[in-house]
């Protein structure tokens, strides 16, 4: 079946511009995660959505980062006024519900801020 | 100090070798331990999943957890070039919403 998909696969932007990254989770998965992967830093948790509950935004690094999930399915991560330190791979994962459930990752969006 | 420490490598071994990958952690509340494999330009995929201490074997892969030492390992027997990837350990306390990942170890298995 279809896995987690993300778009675009690559995004190059200029410092100060806004970007939107999209995630399509596996159908039926109620939990959705966004992570950031920087060189040598591992996966950094950003935000977690579970069903209709309020999202866990505890990992968002600044108020320039926001995310929404519409209709319990597709999610968009928005970064406003991008900075060079935002350059990283942004990964989305979905699971059946709880953090200990297997998380299925998308291929990621590679963001480069010039 | 990070909650989870993992040697980034790179680790280069000949085909057929036994590979040992390790993570140490500081949070004694971690109960669930996972190993993810990530090929270049791909998302991580779950390889092994263990709960609490002990060993778990799946084919050529063995995951080992020693909670008393706060140390987990992944062993790969008869390593193959197709095992060349980055291996990330991940841990979860059982509460909250997030996994805590190591930085990943880059493994290259050479012919």
Image (cartoon, rainbow, N blue to C red):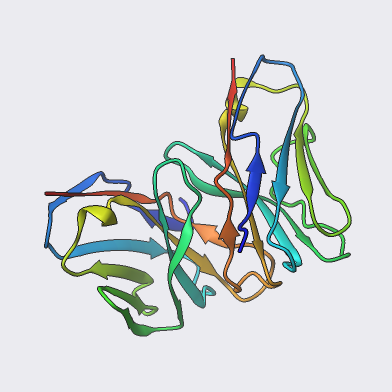
Q: Position of residue A46 (x, y in %)?
A: 67, 48
Position of A59 compared to A50: left or right? left
The vertical placement of A92 against B68, above or below, is above
Task: Name the residue at 57% across, 28% down.
Answer: A87
Q: Position of residue A22 (x, y in %)?
A: 72, 41
- Residue pushed farthest front? A1
The residue closer to the viewer here, B110 or A15, is B110
Position of A67 compared to A107: left or right? right
Q: Position of residue A91 (x, y in %)?
A: 60, 46
Quadrant of res A108: top right
Task: Name the residue at 89% across, 57% down.
Answer: A71
Which image quarter is the N terminus of chain A in?
A: bottom right
Which image quarter is the C terminus of chain A in?
A: top right
Q: How many marks?
A: 0
The residue closer to the viewer here, B83 or A15, is B83
Position of B76 compared to A43: left or right? left
Task: Name the residue at 44% across, 55% down.
Answer: B102
Quadrant of res A86: top right
The vertical placement of B50 against A38, above or below, is below
The vertical placement of B15 against A14, above or below, is below
The residue closer to the viewer here, B23 or B84, is B84
Q: Position of residue B68 (x, y in %)?
A: 37, 80
Task: Name the residue at 46% across, 72% down.
Answer: B33
């Amino acid at each position: 079946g279809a896995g987690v998909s993300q778009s675009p696969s690559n995004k190059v932007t200029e410092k100060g511009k806004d970007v939107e990254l999209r995630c399509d989770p596996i159908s039926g998965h109620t939990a959705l995660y966004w992570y950031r992967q920087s060189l040598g830093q591992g996966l950094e948790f950003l935000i977690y959505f579970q069903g209709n509950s309020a999202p866990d935004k505890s990992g968002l690094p600044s108020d320039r980062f926001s995310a929404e999930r519409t209709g319990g399915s597709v999610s968009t991560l928005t970064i406003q006024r991008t900075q060079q330190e935002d350059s990283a791979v942004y990964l989305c994962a979905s699971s059946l519900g709880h953090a200990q459930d297997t998380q299925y990752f998308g291929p990621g969006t590679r963001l480069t801020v010039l | 100090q990070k909650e989870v420490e993992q040697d980034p490598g790179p680790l280069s071994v000949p085909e057929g070798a036994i590979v040992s990958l390790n993570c140490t952690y500081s949070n004694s509340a971690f109960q669930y331990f996972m190993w993810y494999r990530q090929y270049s330009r791909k998302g991580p995929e779950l390889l092994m999943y263990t709960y609490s201490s002990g060993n778990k074997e799946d084919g050529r892969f063995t995951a080992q957890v020693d909670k008393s030492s706060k140390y987990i390992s992944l062993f790969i027997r008869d390593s193959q070039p197709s095992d060349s990837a980055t291996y990330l350990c991940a841990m979860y306390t059982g509460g909250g919403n997030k996994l805590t990942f190591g930085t990943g170890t880059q493994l290259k298995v050479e012919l």
